[in-house]
Image (cartoon, rainbow, N blue to C red):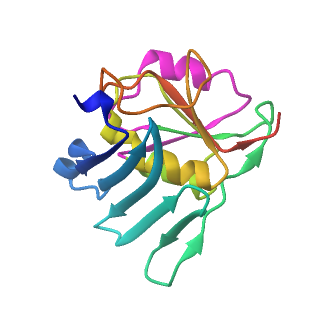
Amino acid sequence: TRRQWEWCWLVDPLDGTKEFIKRNGEFTINVALVHEGRSVLGVVYAPVLDELYWAAAGQGAWMDAGEGPMRLHAPRFRKDQAGLRVVCSRSHLNDETRAFVEQFEAPELISRGSAFKFLMVARGEAHVYPRLAPTMEWDTAAAQIILEEAGGKVLEYESGQPLRYNKENLRNPWFVAWGDVIE
């Protein structure tokens, strides 16, 4: 069975279906290689913007928007600092997410679709991306390794453990994607 596989690919050929239908350009193609439950290689392509993002475990996170490869670095910050930029789902903002955002002092809320939310944190354009609503493994695996290699982390909301893949249920638990938090 699938769960016994040591390696597996997770592919989302159209992440951000609602954004694609709205023609706002915020959709991506996501491809991840998973080894023993951890994302070890990720590629995200944004066709409308012609932006390519990639990362491999231990190799850093990169993007190319037509000017050659550029290394990505998640922002360093403290959770108690004012004005954190919080990126949330354009199509799936709910009461639980709003309550999470309100814990921060004077947060700036940014709405985006698809894997762009992870990429904004990896690029240093946002500090945190809470997802307190359903997602599937193929929605997150590629962008997770990109954010992790940029210095961030993607943690389950309840346990605080890194998001894992090739689980019995392909639905992800709620999670929070953080930049480089200073503890």
Q: In this orientation, which residue lies closer to the viewer: 27 or 154?
A: 154
Left or right? Give the position of 107 relative to 18.
right
Q: In this orientation, which residue lies closer to the viewer: 120 or 107?
A: 120
Left or right? Give the position of 161 relative to 92.
right
**Residue 130 vertical position relative to residue 111 in the rendered view, above or below:** above
Task: Residue 119: give x, y in percent of width and height.
Answer: 50, 53
Q: Looking at the figure, which quarter contains the N terminus?
A: top left
Whether residue 161 is visible here, answered yes or no, is yes
Whether residue 125 is visible here, answered yes or no, is no
Residue at screen point 58% across, 74% down: 70
Residue at screen point 64% across, 45% down: 152
Specify the segment rendered in magenta: 89-114
Residue 40 within the segment the image draws in magenta: no
Left or right? Give the position of 109 relative to 152.
left
Total number of numbered discs in the rendering: 0
Q: Residue furthest left?
A: 21
Q: Residue furthest bottom?
A: 67
Residue 36 is drawn in which quadrant? Answer: top left
**Residue 168 vertical position relative to residue 35 in the rendered view, above or below:** above
Residue at screen point 45% across, 49% down: 143
Q: In this orientation, which residue lies closer to the viewer: 84 or 171?
A: 171
Residue at screen point 67% across, 51% down: 151
Task: Residue 103: give x, y in percent of width and height.
Answer: 68, 21
Residue 92 within the segment the image draws in magenta: yes
